[in-house]
C-alpha cells in the first residue's frame, strides 16, 4: 500500500513537472520573434505528448491555437492546426485529421514561409499514407523534403526522410526504403535530434528483415524497443514488438513470434492506443489455430474484445473530441467577437472624426466674417452630419440593443426607427438655427461691404 501511494505521488509529480515545462515553452513561444526558432520551440512543445497521449496533445494544441490568435501569429496557428489533425489521426479519424491539416495549409500559404510549408506538407502526407494513396504521399514528402533542404531545417528533413523510408518499404521498394531510412538515421544522429530515432530504427529493421539480414534486423528492432521504452510511448513500443513478431513469423520461429506478439498486446493495454492490440491478437489466433490449441479461442476472444474495446474507446474519445470541438468553437467565437468589437471601436472613432470635421467646417462657415456662404451648403453638411450621428449612435448602441431585443430583427428595426424619429426633429431645429445664423451673417457681410463701397465712392467724389 505504501509503495502504491509513493508511486502515485511520483507520477503526479512527474505530470506537474511536464505541465510546468509545457507552460514555460508556451511563454517562450510567445516571446520568440524569430520564425524559425519559434517553430522549433513549437515542435519541442509537442514532443512528449504527440505519440504518448493524444488527448493531452490536443489540449496543448488548443492552448497554442488560442495564444496564436491572441498574438496574431499565423505560424503558431498553422502548427497548432496540424497538431490537432495529428491527434485526430491517433484516434483513428483520418478524415478530420486531414481536414485540420488542409486548414493549416491554407494559413501557411498566406504566410509565404517555406519552412512552415515544409512542416505542413510532411504532416499532410501521413493522411494519404493511411489512405494508401502512395503517389500523393510521395509527392507531398518529396516537396516537403525540397523545402526543408532549401531552408536548412534538419529536423524537418529527417521527418521527410524517415517517412519516405516507411512508404517505400510498404511499397516493397527496399532499395529506396533503405537509402531514405539510412539518411534519416545519419542526419538525426549527426545533428543530435534523436526524438524519433526509434521509429527510424524500426524502419531499418523492417528493411533488413526483407533483405534477409537477420542480425541487423533484430539489432535495429532492439534499438527501437529501447527507445520506445525510454520515451514512454506505447504506440511505438507496440509497433516495434509487432514488427519483430512478424519478422519471426516470417522466418518460421513461431515461439518467438508469439512471445513478441503478446508483448505487443501488453504494451498498449489500458492506454489510448489499446486498439493497436488487434493486429497482434489476430496474428496469435492464427498461429494457435494451426496448432489446434485452446489458445486459439483465447486470442480470438481477445481479438474480438480488442475490437469491442476499440468501439468503446472510440465512443469515449469521440465524446472527448466533441467536447474539445465545442471549446474550440467557443474559442473561435470569442476571437471573432473580439475582432468585431475592435472593428466597431474603429468605426466609432472614424464616425467621430468625420462628425468632428463636419462640425468644424459648419462652425467655420457660420463664424467666418470673410465671405458669404450659400445656405444650401449648410443644408448639405446638415444632412451628412445627421447621417454620421445616426451611424455613430447605431455603432455605439448596437451591442446594447442586441441584448435588449435578443437579436430580433423587427425589434432592432423599431429601435433604430425610434432613434431616427428623435434625431430628425433635432436635426431640423439645428438646421433652422444654423440657416438663420448664416442668413444673419451674410446680411452683415453684405451690409459691411455696401458701407465700405459707399465710403470709397464718397471719397472719390470729394
Image (cartoon, rainbow, N blue to C red):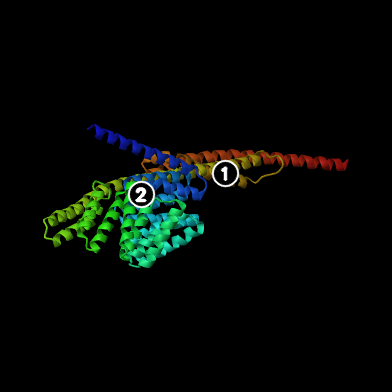
Furthest toward the right, the residue is: 462
Estimate the spatial distance between the alpha carbons at disc 2 and disc 1, rounded to whole Å: 53 Å
Report the quarter where the C terminus lies.
top right
| Coordinates of residue 3 in the picture (x, y in percent) | 25, 34
Q: Quadrant of residue 417?
A: top left
Left-right relation of 102 to 316: right
Q: Residues within 10 Å of mark 2 (few under 14, many from 20)?
A: many
Q: Is residue 401 above or below residue 209?
A: above
Query: Residue at the location (31% across, 38% down)?
Result: 11
Left-right relation of 26 to 131: right
Query: Residue at the location (39% across, 38% down)?
Result: 20
Name the residue that disc number 1 marks. 354
Report the quarter where the N terminus lies.
top left
Is 376 or 106 nearer to us in this picture?
A: 106
| Coordinates of residue 313 in the picture (x, y in percent) | 24, 49
| Coordinates of residue 42 in the picture (x, y in percent) | 43, 47
Is 412 or 291 nearer to us in this picture?
A: 291
| Label pair 2/1, CB-CB below 8 angstroms | no
Q: Residues within 10 Å of mark 1 (few under 14, many from 20)?
A: some
On residue 50, which mark appears?
A: 2
Left-right relation of 409 to 34: left
Is 148 or 380 nearer to us in this picture?
A: 148
| Coordinates of residue 219 in the picture (x, y in percent) | 33, 56
Q: Quadrant of residue 250?
A: bottom left
Q: Secondary structure at mark 2?
A: loop
- Is residue 340 something one can see in this rendering? no
Query: Residue at the location (15% across, 59% down)?
Result: 288
On residue 106, which mark appears?
A: none
First along the sequence among labels 2 and 1: 2
- Is residue 245 something one can see in this rendering? yes
Query: Residue at the location (69% across, 44% down)?
Result: 372
Amino acid at each position: 500500500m505504501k509503495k502504491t501511494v509513493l508511486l502515485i505521488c511520483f507520477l503526479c509529480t512527474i505530470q506537474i513537472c511536464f505541465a510546468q515545462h509545457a507552460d514555460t515553452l508556451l511563454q517562450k513561444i510567445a516571446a520568440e520573434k524569430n520564425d524559425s526558432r519559434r517553430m522549433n520551440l513549437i515542435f519541442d512543445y509537442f514532443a512528449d505528448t504527440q505519440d504518448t497521449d493524444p488527448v493531452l496533445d490536443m489540449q496543448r494544441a488548443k492552448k497554442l491555437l488560442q495564444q496564436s490568435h491572441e498574438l496574431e501569429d499565423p505560424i503558431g496557428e498553422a502548427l497548432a492546426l496540424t497538431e490537432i489533425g495529428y491527434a485526430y489521426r491517433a484516434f483513428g479519424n483520418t478524415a478530420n485529421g486531414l481536414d485540420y491539416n488542409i486548414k493549416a495549409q491554407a494559413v501557411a500559404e498566406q504566410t509565404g514561409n517555406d519552412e512552415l510549408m515544409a512542416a505542413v506538407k510532411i504532416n499532410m502526407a501521413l493522411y494519404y499514407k493511411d489512405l494508401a494513396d502512395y503517389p500523393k504521399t510521395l509527392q507531398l514528402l518529396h516537396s516537403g523534403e525540397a523545402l526543408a533542404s532549401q531552408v536548412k531545417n534538419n529536423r524537418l528533413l529527417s521527418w521527410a526522410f524517415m517517412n519516405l523510408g516507411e512508404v517505400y518499404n510498404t511499397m516493397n521498394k527496399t532499395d529506396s526504403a533503405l537509402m531514405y531510412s539510412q539518411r534519416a538515421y545519419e542526419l538525426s544522429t549527426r545533428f543530435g535530434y534523436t526524438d524519433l530515432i526509434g521509429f527510424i530504427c524500426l524502419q531499418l529493421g523492417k528493411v533488413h528483415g526483407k533483405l534477409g539480414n537477420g542480425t541487423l534486423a533484430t539489432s535495429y528492432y532492439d534499438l527501437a524497443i529501447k527507445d520506445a521504452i525510454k520515451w514512454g510511448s506505447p504506440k511505438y513500443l507496440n509497433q516495434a514488438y509487432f514488427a519483430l513478431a512478424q519478422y519471426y513469423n516470417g522466418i518460421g520461429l513461431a515461439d518467438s513470434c508469439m512471445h513478441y506478439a503478446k508483448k505487443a498486446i501488453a504494451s498498449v493495454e489500458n492506454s489510448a492506443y489499446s486498439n493497436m492490440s488487434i493486429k497482434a491478437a489476430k496474428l496469435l489466433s492464427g498461429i494457435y489455430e494451426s496448432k489446434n490449441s485452446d489458445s486459439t479461442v483465447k486470442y480470438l476472444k481477445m481479438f474480438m474484445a480488442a475490437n469491442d474495446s476499440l468501439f468503446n474507446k472510440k465512443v469515449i474519445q469521440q465524446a472527448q473530441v466533441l467536447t474539445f470541438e465545442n471549446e474550440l468553437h467557443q474559442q473561435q467565437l470569442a476571437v471573432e467577437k473580439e475582432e468585431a468589437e475592435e472593428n466597431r471601436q474603429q468605426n466609432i472613432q472614424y464616425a467621430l472624426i468625420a462628425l468632428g470635421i463636419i462640425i468644424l467646417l459648419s462652425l467655420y462657415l457660420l463664424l467666418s466674417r470673410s465671405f458669404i456662404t450659400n445656405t444650401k451648403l449648410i443644408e448639405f453638411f446638415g444632412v451628412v452630419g445627421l447621417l454620421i450621428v445616426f451611424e455613430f449612435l447605431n455603432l455605439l448602441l448596437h451591442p446594447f440593443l442586441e441584448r435588449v431585443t435578443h437579436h430580433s430583427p423587427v425589434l432592432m428595426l423599431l429601435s433604430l426607427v425610434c432613434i431616427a424619429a428623435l434625431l430628425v426633429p433635432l436635426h431640423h431645429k439645428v438646421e433652422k438655427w444654423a440657416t438663420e445664423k448664416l442668413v444673419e451673417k451674410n446680411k452683415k457681410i453684405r451690409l459691411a461691404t455696401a458701407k465700405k463701397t459707399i465710403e470709397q465712392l464718397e471719397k472719390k467724389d470729394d
